[in-house]
Image: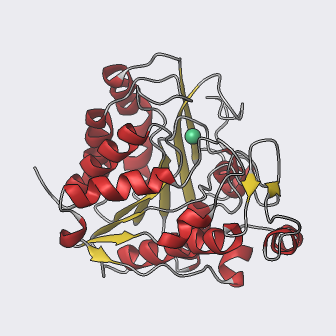
Amino acid sequence: MTTGLCTDERFRAHVPPWEHPEKPERLAAIERALDEAGLPARMVRVAARPATRVELERVHGRAYLDELEATLANPPGNGSGWLDADTYFSRGTWVATLLAAGSTVEVATRVAAGELDNGLALVRPPGHHATGDQAMGFCLINNVAVAAAALEADGKRVAIFDWDVHHGNGTEAIFDANPRVLYVSTHEWPQYPGTGAAHHTGVGAGVGTKVNVPLRKGTDGPAYLEAYDRWVKPAIEAFEPDVILVSAGFDAHRDDPLGGLKLTEETYDTTLRHLLSVQPRLMMVLEGGYDLGAIARSTVRCAKTLLGDP
Ligand SMILES: [Zn+2]
């Protein structure tokens, strides 16, 4: 398999002002584990690149982008601050944010074009809570949405599967009325941000293309896979996507300090194998996940599966 891998030192320059779960060490832990498993040598390095204004404007409002750039490009004072109660910025944030979105587009585009069989983008800050005009939940620009919109502009049918423990309210809102982008999310319920009720299936022309699978605190791997088979599998199979984008947060892992689900590396692997059986043109982009060991082991397991290891 030709598996693309995109990550960059500059993602680590998005630095919290004090102790915060969404920290640069997350990527360092994943990269170290991939190295120890000898995986990067088997993958095709994709250079990180910033998203263009045209790419960003497909999903974010101009006024929001202008305001974000004005705040982040030359931050006042010591260079750090908060966009909401959870979402910080530092001097490196603007560059990291543009690179996170652009790198996700780059890997997704190469997978969709068949230059890569599949791919993995290890980026920060994460994206799935960012709406068209609001930063929230550690997210500023919605990386997976920017990538999905780029593929959609190229005529592709895109399915986004979001297995982060939190509902991807931003991604859903951006594509809520759009029937050409399927958004399927499994998430703990109740949990932040409070959206993702099972009865929400989209709005207007998009009704039926948004699938929410809320799961009780304590749901373990076998119970998760049962819910997956019942709700996720038929939705993704019926949509017949040209490409699958996975919003891959690993905070539904049993070791995660923020999430209350009890998934394991095995659960992610089983899920990923099914997704690949529906559409092998697939890319994963990192969202949340706050236990360094859990995110490192889970990413290694998924990367091996992307590479075609049994
Ligand atoms: Zn999350």
**Residue 106 visible in the snapshot:** yes
Which residue is depicted at the point 87% across and 74% down? 70
Residue 76 in the image, given as x and y percentages of width and height: 88, 69
Above or below: residue 306 compared with residue 198: below
Query: Which image quadrant is residue 55 in?
Result: bottom right
Residue 166 in the image, given as x and y percentages of width and height: 59, 36
Above or below: residue 233 compared with residue 119: above
Query: Which image quadrant is residue 266 in?
Result: top left
The residue most toward the left is 310
Which residue is depicted at the point 50% across and 74% down? 103
**Closest to the observer, 18 or 193:** 18
Residue 184 in the image, given as x and y percentages of width and height: 52, 44
Query: Which image quadrant is residue 208 in?
Result: top right
Q: Is residue 281 left or right of residue 138?
A: left
Quadrant location of the N terminus in the rendered image:
bottom left
Q: Quadrant of ligand 1?
A: top right
Which residue is depicted at the point 54% across and 66% down? 11
